[in-house]
Image (cartoon, grey):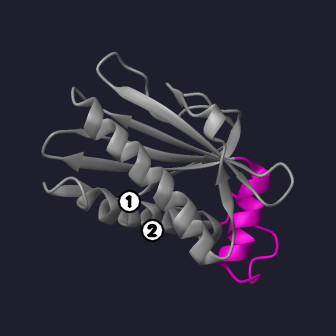
Amino acid sequence: MRDLKLLSVMVQAFAVSTVKVSKGLGFNLKIKKESIVPGIKSESASAAALIGVIGEDFKGSVTLLINKKAFDYIIKTMSGGMIQSPSTDDPVSMSALGELANMICGSALQELGKSYSKHVDITPPQMFAGENLKSIPSESEDMKYYTIPLLGEAEGAKLYLVLGFR
């Protein structure tokens, strides 16, 4: 992505939307502003949701990498307590994570529309699970990545929003 102003607007839109959507669902995530960094920088995660984002001037991905504590916290809250033991092996739990990614991207596109008037599309989420996920998108020279770490209210609940655009 050549336009750093657009990249900045996108980082802001996705960060604000992640906090706004989580609050609307009943759980609070706080951005660790001092830890926002270029590149892909995350601790290990147990689940991830990746959504492609394609605009007239860019293409890329938005990835939510979450640890087990965050996964449990988010899925229990999103299900209203109906899922007491969230598992990455459970399709309903993973579907809830995919829905969270969809909601964040939809909200971010509304935010982005305030300063970017061109058409933007998103893809359905791709879901990943494993014991030591560190990075879902591949790093390449023509992609600009930013990692936005967020903390949940539950002790040790961490989520990483990884944005990659060219």
Image vertical order of residue 147 relative to residue 25, above or below: above
* Residue at horizontal 29 percent and vertical 20 percent from the top: 142
Residue type, numbered disc 1 = Ala
- Quadrant where the N terminus lies? top left
Camera-side residue of 150 and 96: 150
Query: Does the magenta-highlighted stretch encompass residue 72?
Result: yes
Residue closer to the observer: 81 or 25: 25
On-image quarter of the C terminus? top left
Q: Measured from the top left, where is residue 24 in percent x and y?
A: 57, 76
154 over 143 or under it: above or below:
below
SS under mark 1: helix
Spatial separation of the CA atoms under disc 2 and disc 1: 8 Å
Determine the residue positioned at 74% across, 84% down: 82
Residue 141 location in percent, x, y? Answer: 34, 15
Q: Which residue is mark 1?
A: 108
Along the line of sight, the residue nearer the viewer: 143 or 48: 143
Mark 2 is surrounded, within 10 Å at the Cα level, by few (under 14), some (14 to 19) or many (20 or more) other residues, namely some
Instruction: Judge left or right: residue 46 versus residue 112.
Output: right
N-terminal label among 2 and 1: 2
Judge left or right: residue 95 versus residue 109. Answer: right
Residue 108 place in picture, x, y as percent: 38, 59
Residue 103, numbered circle: 2
Amino acid type assigned to the residue bearing label 2 in the image:
Met
- Outermost residue toward the right? 155
Please say whether residue 106 is one of the residues in the magenta stretch: no
Magenta residues span 67-90
Q: Residue at x 43, y 29 (%)?
A: 145
Q: Is residue 130 left or right of residue 163?
A: right
Neighbour tally class for label 1: few under 14, some 14-19, many 20 plus, Cα within 10 Å:
many
Q: Is residue 1 visible?
A: yes
Give the foreground label among 2 and 1: 1
Vertical order, 118 against 149 (above or below): below
